Each structure stands twice: as C-alpha cells, then as structure tokens.
Amino acid sequence: MATDQSGSNPPTLNVTAISARNGASTIECWQLANPFKASTAAGVSGASFAQLGKAGPVSYALIPARFDGGLHNAPAVQYVAFLAGEAVVSTPESGQSAIIKGGKDGLIIAADTAAVSRKGHDTKYPSREQTIGIQIPTADGKVPPHTVLYSGPCKKIDLP
C-alpha cells in the first residue's frame, strides 16, 4: 500500500465495492479518486481526510444477530460503514463473496442498483452480536469517481 510522505496514510481511499458488469452484480476493489488531504479544521488539524462527496439522507441501521438479508439490489448507490458485527456479501451470478467486519475496515460501497443489476447480491449477518451500519447514499445516486484496482474484495493490505 502506498503512503503519504509521513508514512502513515495512503494517498487515496480504497473500498470494497458491490457493483455490476453486464447486468450482473460483482465485487471489486475500488480506489476512490479524491485523495487524502491534511485538515486545517480545529480539533483535527493535520489529520488526513478523503472527501466522499455529497450525500442523501443518512440512516443508522441495527441489524439483528444471525440475520439473513436475502437477495436484493442496493436501494441506492450508497456507502455503508459497518461499525460492529459482520456482513457476508455474495454475488450469485459471479460467484464472488466478501466478508466485511465492522470497524476500521468496514466501509464499502453498494452500487448494484436495479438499474444496473438483474439479481443484485445476497447479504447475511452471521455474527452472534448485532451488526451496526451507517448507510450513506450518494447525492443524486451518482457513483463516485474511481478506478477499479481488481476483481474481488479489497485485501487488508490495500485498506487504510
């Protein structure tokens, strides 16, 4: 993973994306276009921030332990930040899966809306504890500028 000059942060943010190609949901590792920049805001001056873009209505989700979310499309292009618990996402048409653990590596983007994916993806929450997530839809349903790094979920080494 590349880091900034201080050696502590990557130059850009990578996220696991549930996207679609040729009408089928797929899992990819995306590098978002907006770079990390040093903040000058009081209380976090000098810390690194990557702008995720404008957002629609944000929600806080409490998902029961061992919950089966079933096969579905993303309701909107949205970031999901899993704070606790675990999500297992699979794409039936591509045969891919990703395990997303709540915490610092828990940010994903779901972009396989019904407009681009026939079947969507399956999500299960196998943890014995409640899974907590924050759903952050992008403004106007736009996919953020990005580069696809590779097929499959981001590897731990590629996450901040």
Image: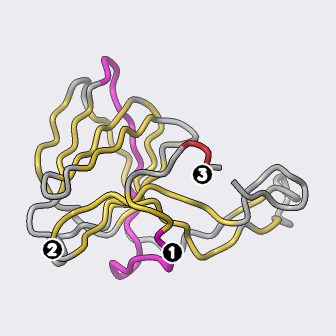
Q: Position of residue 5 (x, y in %)?
A: 89, 61
Q: Earlier in the sequence, mark 3 or mark 2?
A: 2
Which mark, residue 147?
Answer: 1
Q: Earlier in the sequence, mark 2 or mark 1?
A: 2
Give the residues in magenta.
Answer: 127-148
Total residue callouts? 3
Q: Residue at x 46, y 59 (%)?
A: 29
Reply yes or no: does residue 128 show up in magenta.
Answer: yes
Crowd tier of the residue under label 2, counting other residues whose Cα lies within 10 Å: few below 14, some 14–19, many 20 or above: some
Which residue type does callout 1 highlight?
Thr
* Residue, disc 3: 158
Q: Position of residue 2 (x, y in %)?
A: 74, 58
Crowd tier of the residue under label 1, counting other residues whose Cα lies within 10 Å: few below 14, some 14–19, many 20 or above: few
* Residue, disc 2: 23
Residue 14, quarter of picture: bottom right
Horizontal relation, residue 24 to residue 96: left or right: left
- Disc 2 from disc 1: Cα separation: 19 Å
- Disc 3 from disc 1: Cα separation: 13 Å
Q: Residue at x 35, y 82 (%)?
A: 140
Q: Earlier in the sequence, mark 3 or mark 1?
A: 1
Reply yes or no: does residue 6 show up in magenta.
Answer: no
Which residue type does callout 3 highlight?
Asp
Residue 47, quarter of picture: bottom right
Q: Position of residue 133 (x, y in %)?
A: 39, 43
